[in-house]
Image (cartoon, grey):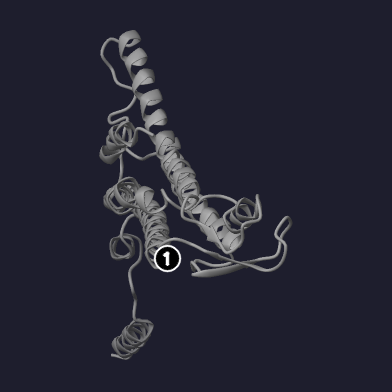
Amino acid sequence: MNWSALEALLSGVNKYSTAFGRVWLSMVFVFRVLVFVVAAQRVWGDENKDFVCNTAQPGCSNVCYDHLFPISHIRIWALQLIFVTCPSLMVMAHVTYRENKDRKYTASHKGAHLYANPGKKRGGLWWTYLASLIFKAGFDAGFLYILYYIYEGYDMPRLSKCTLKPCPNTVDCYISRPTEKRIFTLFMVVSSAACIFVCICEMLYLVCKRIHKVKLKKIKAERKMFAEMAPLTAPRSEFMSKTSIRVDTTVSMHNISNNIIAKESSEKK
């Protein structure tokens, strides 16, 4: 399989990815694709040829090998890498669609642009990017479960016993280089788990950033509405100074009584 073509295709996703997305892509190609191409294929290249059972019964070794290895690890990992990297193409396809749409809009509206930046994760592109992360994490988790279910764990036994026909009795079968295969299996499993963790971190980052932006937008809208309504209402102190005068009733009554007494004394004189 031409992995270099897939690498060149997915390298264009870097400019549309977050920092977590770039870390994920680097982990996939350095710790999974390169290890798969350089080392893993050679380790599992002799699994059928060097699978030995202590019997001369024709067909027994083939039946036991098919029972112990229903699907080769190499083929499972190849399918896993293909399924995991394909969701990133969704983002590239959406960006390409935006660029073509913006190009048509610019041609029909005299240079005006429909998108300021077609690769900016807003609107539908944000949902496409989030969906690609969910698919990537889901595919990785699914293939880890398939590998665990088929081989009943991630271990590689040195000795396996087989009782299937046409074997005459219980047959001991030996796998070539089981320790080395166990190490590579655990390495690929840990690499897949690390990629799942990075995808979850990126999903949380996108959601938290989106919530923060929505809150800021709401606060700005409230401040703008308050600023527009403030000139319509006069301050309370100014309203009170213009419309009401505080009068001390005790002082007014005292002045009236003094005036009456002064008037009566002047009449007596």
* Total residue callouts: 1
- Front residue of 35/190: it is 35
Toward which corner of the image does residue 168 lie, by quadrant? bottom right
> Is 240 left or right of 75, judged from the image as shown?
left
Give percent across and percent down for residue 17. 31, 43
> Is 231 left or right of 53, judged from the image as shown?
left
Q: Is residue 229 visible?
A: no
**Mark 1 — residue?**
182
Up the image or down, 148 lies above or below 139; here it is: below
> Is 63 left or right of 135, judged from the image as shown?
right
Residue visible at 33% across and 69% down? Answer: 245
Up the image or down, 166 lies above or below 153; here it is: above
Give percent across and percent down for residue 28. 33, 50
- Front residue of 161/196: it is 161
Residue visible at 28% across and 17% down? Answer: 112
Give percent across and percent down for residue 96. 36, 25
Q: Is residue 234 visible?
A: yes
Location of the N terminus (image quadrant): top left
Amino acid beneath label 1: Arg
Location of the C terminus (image quadrant): bottom left
Q: Answer few, some or many: residues within 10 Å of disc 1's Cα (few below 14, many 20 plus, some between 14 and 19).
A: some
